[in-house]
């Protein structure tokens, strides 16, 4: 039985196709010997996918499909490193596990925030650390995957704000959080489509000899940037490189973050409601349409491109790779999935581009504003 080394806030498709997939690689290739306990961050009862995952003993499959170097790639793998899913009300019991070392999360862009008196994700982290500190156990390493700038720093700041609301002597707990725990900021990059289309699901069931209702599909490409404090050797404890994961450890992740969030995520958020208005359901359908393809290329090469402070050759290569990934005919990346929490996403992904573009050219980026107008139309009609 593998020891529970990782506590994961978030049961969704992305973490299961990104972090848990990586943990499986570390177990198989690098002798990590760790298990993941998932915490469903919202709700007093388990959602249906969580129940299914528990019924399967935490086991499920990933399917990575795409085109690499002109060749079609399809990899169907079993993920067996997950112990199961529990609700956040039971969080404190996991604080007492001596084997626990890491906490990963993806609670969306809106998850890492301080709201006085509310049981936010950072408030839940404080509960976890309070119980662990009281048990006399070592601090934890936090690796948040929420797509906000300086996610680790922001998580720590929100936790400390919640601590400041506590009554009584909190000096020891504050020292434990500030000096005994490590909060890493990250950048994650993999397009995860989620559930397979019905035809593929039937084919996978035949190949596996079972129906896996929590199988998750993603692209083969992945990239993980982890910003660590100077002198902190994360690889010695979490052997991602040894397992063959495309990971970069750095003390300054900003150049990587700006490139990815603007070219990939800001483009997604700009195009999503325009695509839905035109009757498209998947990203690849948008790219296959000549007129919409021209719109996307305008967003990428005329509006986002000049706001990214990197060499033009490097930007062009990365931007073209993004469009190739968008066109992946196997991803089935649903626009309605991208559309979740669009307002929060627009503020963190698109607004910085719009502001920088305006500073540079004295006008708003036309195509991106068309995407914003489509978003506004959607929210206005939903009132």
Image: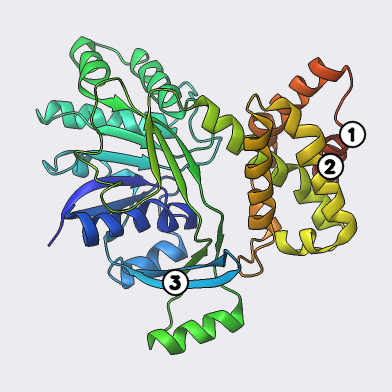
- Position above or below: 154 against 246: above
Q: How is the image coloured?
A: rainbow
Residues at circles 2 and 1 in contact by the CB criterion of under 8 Å: yes
For the C terminus, the quadrant is: top right
Earlier in the chain: of badge 1 and badge 3, it is 3
The x and y percentages for residue 187 are 48, 37
Disc 2 residue crowd, few under 14, some 14–19, many 20+, Cα 10 Å:
some
Earlier in the chain: of badge 3 and badge 2, it is 3
Nearer to us of marks 1 and 3 is 3
Between the C-alphas of marks 2 and 1, the distance is 9 Å
- Say which residue label 3 marks: 75
- Left or right of 110: which side holds 21? left
Q: Nearer the viewer, residue 254 or 153?
A: 254
Circle on res. 325: none
Residue at (42% x, 22% y) in the render: 153
- Say which residue label 2 marks: 298
Residue at (21% x, 10% y) in the render: 171
For the N terminus, the quadrant is: bottom left
| Corner quadrant of residue 359 | top right
- Left or right of 100: which side holds 122? right
The x and y percentages for residue 377 are 86, 43
The x and y percentages for residue 214 are 44, 69
- Left or right of 258: which side holds 378? right
Can residue 289 be seen from the camera position used here?
Answer: yes
Residues at circles 1 and 3 in contact by the CB criterion of under 8 Å: no
- Position above or below: 232 against 186: above
- Left or right of 280: which side holds 143? left
- Position above or below: 131 against 52: above
Can residue 383 be seen from the camera position used here?
Answer: no
- Say which residue label 1 marks: 366
Q: Nearer the viewer, residue 136 or 197?
A: 197
Earlier in the chain: of badge 2 and badge 1, it is 2
């Amino acid at each position: 039985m593998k020891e529970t080394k990782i506590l994961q806030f978030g049961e969704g498709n992305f973490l299961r196709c990104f972090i848990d997939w990586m943990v499986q690689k570390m177990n198989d290739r690098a002798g990590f010997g760790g298990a993941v306990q998932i915490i469903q961050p919202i709700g007093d009862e388990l959602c249906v996918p969580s129940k299914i995952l528990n019924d399967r003993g935490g086991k499920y499959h990933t399917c990575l499909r795409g085109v690499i170097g002109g060749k079609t790639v399809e990899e169907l793998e079993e993920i067996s490193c997950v112990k199961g899913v529990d609700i956040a009300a039971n969080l404190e019991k996991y604080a007492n596990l001596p084997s626990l070392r890491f906490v990963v999360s993806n609670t969306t862009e809106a998850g890492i925030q301080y709201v006085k008196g509310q049981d936010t994700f950072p408030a839940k982290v404080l509960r976890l650390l309070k119980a662990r500190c009281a048990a006399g156990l070592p601090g934890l390493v936090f690796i948040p995957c929420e797509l906000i700038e300086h996610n680790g720093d922001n998580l720590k700041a929100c936790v400390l704000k919640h601590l400041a609301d506590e009554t009584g002597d909190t000096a020891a707990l504050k020292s434990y959080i500030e000096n005994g725990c490590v909060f890493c900021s990250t950048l994650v990059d993999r397009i995860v489509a989620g559930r397979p289309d019905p035809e593929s699901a039937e084919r996978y069931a035949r190949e596996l000899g079972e129906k896996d209702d929590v199988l998750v599909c993603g692209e083969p490409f992945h990239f993980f940037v982890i910003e660590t404090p100077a002198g902190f050797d994360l690889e010695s404890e979490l052997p991602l490189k040894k397992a063959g994961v495309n990971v970069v450890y750095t003390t300054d992740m900003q150049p990587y973050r700006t490139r990815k969030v603007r070219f990939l995520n800001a483009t997604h958020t700009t195009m999503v409601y325009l695509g839905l208005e035109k009757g498209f359901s998947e990203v690849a359908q948008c790219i296959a349409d000549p007129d919409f393809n021209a719109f996307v290329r305008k967003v990428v090469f005329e509006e986002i491109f000049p706001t990214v402070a990197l060499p033009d050759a490097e930007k062009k290569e990365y931007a073209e790779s993004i469009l190739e990934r968008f066109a992946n005919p196997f991803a089935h990346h649903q626009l309605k999935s991208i559309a979740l929490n669009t307002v929060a996403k627009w503020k963190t992904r698109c607004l910085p581009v719009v502001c920088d573009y305006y500073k540079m050219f004295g006008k708003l980026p036309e195509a991106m504003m068309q995407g914003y107008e489509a978003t506004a139309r959607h929210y206005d009609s939903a009132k």
